[in-house]
Every structure is written in structure tokens, then in C-alpha cells.
Image (spheres, rainbow, N blue to C red):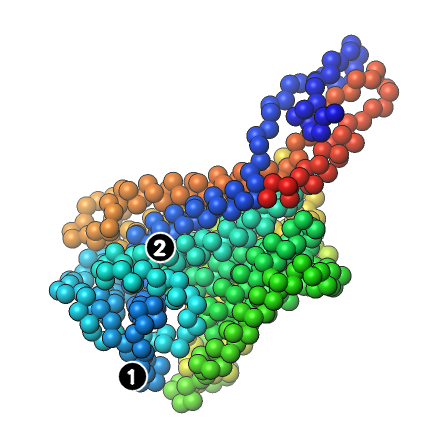
Amino acid sequence: MPTSAEQQPEPSVPVGAGRSARPRRRARSPWSPRAVFWLSWAVLTALGGVWALASPMAAGPDEPAHIVRAAALVRGAPLEEARVGVWRAELPRIYGLTGEMPGCFAFRSSEPASCWDADWGDVSAPQGATTSAGNYNPLYYAVVGLPTVLEPRLGTLYLMRFMSALLGGFCIALGLRSVAETARRRWVVPAVAVATTPMVVFMNSTVNPNAVEAAAGIGLWLTLTIALREPDDRLVSRRWWRAGVLVVLLVNAKAFSPLFLAIIVLAAAVLAGWRCVRAALVDARAWPGLGLGVVGSVAAVLWILRAGAVSGAGIIAYPELTTAKALNDVLRLTSSYVEQQFGRFGWHDTPSPGSVYLLLAAALGLLVLLALAVARGREALALAGVAALVVALPVVLQVPNATQVGLPWQGRYLMAVSVGVPLLAGVLLDARSPVTGAAARRVSSLLLAVVGVVQVLAFGENLRRYVAGTSAPWFEPVVDPWQPPLPVAVLVGGAVLAVLAWVVLLARVAREADPVPAPAVDVRPVGAGASPEPAAENLAREQDASVASRT
């Protein structure tokens, strides 16, 4: 007995039938969630790897400090506090050199990276190296620092970047696997593309714990909302194990990560409702994954308390920043924070082209407005609440201590929360959007195309900035350009291919969400009132039931 539209023979249509049968193209076999995970991990790692080679070493924000922290941890070099907020370790000279590398081009976007005249000498000789990240949680550094057991040279530093790209790609791929386990994903897939901004990709290509914080945030938003809103008896255990791993990676990233985790959990709970939350909590199959997340969270909080990672300076260093002035300044900087989350590279000295900000803002705005238009009470509350927190948290976390520490906030600090805005919008649209079928496919394809263009434009601008400087012409030779590890043409081609692979992969995952309709054939005479709808409904139910079997 046929079980799908592909197996049903096309019946002949007698004269006078209401509709004529047309041969249908056989649908391609869908990718399993496991295949989606491996493919997306590979593509995201490749994209991050190309970015890693397109930026000179130590061009990421605070990258020298994080490189030294990772090298000291993995190599077993003790960190000694040289002065307040600065630690020192004896390491091979190559790691200390990272503090000198960006000196001539950081904060000067018109200066190419070739300005640094390297004195390599004996890069393996022991030398003191300093870091401001000496009291940061060690989990991220234990991963990205693994290459430091190799011979100390420039290639080792690039391998550290690749480890960061590998870890970030892993986190996002876990979230996409959760998406691939659902039948309703036409909107959430392009939302993943919008959430994975050029800044997320850039941070993944550098040595900085903000990378894993943002990437794990994307994975956790997806996995947690799906586990709560769309429970599946066959997938309970693996989904909650997945969530537990992502919680551990997120909460142990930086000092404010436990707060961001609490926001994600609360928003997902509000979105799903108490009945779904209670069902998850009483299901023993979810307990091991939940337990892993709880243990990881407790460990993170204990580390923060022990290391004093969020303590204030205790000295009035900025007396001019009264509460009123600090509040005004932070609100005025809100648009800058959002710009940084979209894509502002280097030491925040390299903005993306203006079209990148416009296109991303339009894509994000479309998702949010459509979602708010169809959302119900608590769903709208969850989405609007997260969006409001993106604006409010920099105020709450800076203004009370502004006279002591100033206004040091940067947009990348909040990406673990801000990525939830498009992701929640996508989840809501998949559940409630009246835009379905061909119209939804066209909008989804348009959003993915926009993201592809945005990623290529941002990559090109970042590469141009370091090769020639932002004041140099685009297509004319320049004097003394920076030479990246691979030829510029190879990097550009690699970036285009990686972005194309990312967009095509997402398009395929989104397209598989649409049930293949049963042949719309009416074999009764005109007026008999036959309807093809039951067959289509049965096929959709079969597709929903088969998703888990492909995992």
C-alpha cells in the first residue's frame, strides 16, 4: 500500500474530470538531522577559517590577552598578578609578540596591517607575556589553547583561531540539528541566517570567548525553544543532552554569561507556557541533560565568585559620569551597539559597508514585525521582552558603576541575548504565520539571498581594510599591501564558496519543511464533489512522523 505521494501511481482521468493529472517530479530524499549537523558544522568552520586567514594576527578585539591566557593554561605556565587587573606568565616569545602586532594598525582603519615591522628572532625563547584575562573562566581557553602544545610559531596562532571557529560552528550546528528535527521550519531557518551576523562569524574566527558565547547562544535558543514547544518522545533525551552541552559552553564563557543564560531560559519558558515546562521537568529522560546544565552553571557561578570577575574598581575614576549623564550617553550609544552586533570588525575600527547594516536591519525588522503581528499574548511578551532587554541591559549594567569603570560596553558583549530576537521571531512565524506555501518560500529565499550578499560584502570590506587600508581604492594597486597567509584571490574565492554553501544548505533545510502535496487528481465526474485535501493532510502527517526516524 503506498505511503507517500511519490509511491502513488498517477490514475488516468476520464473525460469530463474536474482536473487533469500532470506528472510530478520525484522529490529528493531529505537530509537527516544528523547530516544537517555535520554539513553545517563543516560549512561554518570553513567560513570562520577563511575569516581567520583574512585578518592579521591579533586583529581581533583583545585577542592578544586571550591568546596569552589560553597558552598559559594549556602549557601549564603559572599566572602571577603583576598589577591590578593584569597577569604575567613566562611563555615562548611568540605569544608575547601578539601584544605588539596590532600596535600600528589598531584603531587606524586607513593603515594596512603591513605597517608592523616584525622582529621575529627566536620566537621560542621564554619571555614574559601579560594578559588582562587572567581570572577568566578556563573552559574556552582549554579548547582554543590546544595548538599551543605544538612548536611556537605564527601558524600555531592561526590554529588557535581555527579551534575557535570549530567550536563556534559546533554550537550553531547543534541548534540547526534541533531545527532539522521539526517539520515546521520554513521561517526559523532564515532567522538562523539573520542571527548569524558577520560579527558572529568574525568573532568565531578570533581567539575571544565572546565567540563561543554568541554561538552557544544561537544553539541554545533553538534547542531549548524546540525542546519545550515541540516535544517528541523519540527525541527527548538527545535534545536535552544537546541543551546541557550548550548551557555548559555558554555559561562558562564570560562573567555575565549566567545572567544571559537566565534570560534565555526565562524567555523560552514564557514562550512555551507552564504546561510545556512542567512536562519537561517531570520527564526523567530529560534529567541527565538538565543535570549537566545545572552542574555547569553552578561551576560557572563559583568561578566568578572565586575569581572576582565582576567586581568593580572601587576608585572614582570618572567623576564626570553622573547618573544622568551616564544614562544619556548609554542610550545615545544604543545604535552603535546594534551596529557592532551586525558587524564592526578589528578593534571596532572597521565598520561594514552601509548596505550591510541596511539589509540586515530590513531582514530583522521584517521577521520581528511579522512575528508580532501573529503572536499571541505571552508569545508577544517573550519576543518584545527580549528585544527590550537588548536596549536595557547596557543601561542596567553600566550606569550604576559608571563613575568607577566608565562606559566600556561593546555590542559583542550582548550577542548571546540579541540573537534570540530573530530566532524567536522565526519560531513564532513557523507556528502562526498565515504566509505559507509559495509566498513563504519566496520570502525565505529572499532573506537567505540577502544574508549571502551581506556576508560577502562584510568579508570583502574587512579584507580590504587590512590589505590596503580603508582609504585605498578598491581595484587599484597599492604600495606595500599586507600579505595574508594565502593569496587574496584565494581568500575571496574561498569566502564566496563558503557563503554560497551556507546559503544553499539553509535553503535546502528550509525547503524540506514543505510537504510535497499529493497529486491533485479528481477521478469523479464533474459535480461529484471530490476533494484531494485528505490525501495531502495524511501526507503531511506522515512527514511529521518521519522526521525523528531520520535522526
What kind of residue is marked 2? Phe
Q: Is residue 143 above or below residue 526?
A: below
> Which residue is disc 1 drawn over?
82
What kind of residue is marked 1? Ala
Residue 30 in view, yes or no = yes
Identify the element where label 1 is drawn: strand
Residue at 22%, 65% (x, y): give it: 94
Identify the element where label 2 is drawn: helix
Q: Nearer the viewer, residue 518 or 546?
A: 546
Residue at 38%, 87% (x, y): give it: 317
Q: Quadrant of residue 267?
A: bottom right
The answer for how far apart the CA atoms under marks 2 and 1 are is: 30 Å
Q: Position of residue 71 (x, y in %)?
A: 31, 68
Single out the residue that lies furthest toward the bottom.
315
Q: Position of residue 140 (x, y in %)?
A: 42, 65
Q: Nearer the viewer, residue 282 or 453?
A: 282
Quadrant in which the N terminus is drawn: top right
> Which residue is disc 2 drawn over?
162
Q: Residues within 10 Å of mark 1 (few under 14, many from 20)?
A: few
Q: Is residue 531 above or below residue 485?
A: above
Q: Nearer the viewer, residue 336 or 248?
A: 248
Label annotation for residue 472: none
Determine whether, in the image, residue 458 is placed left or right of residue 216: left
Determine whether, in the image, residue 205 is placed left or right of residue 365: left
Q: Position of residue 20 (x, y in %)?
A: 72, 17
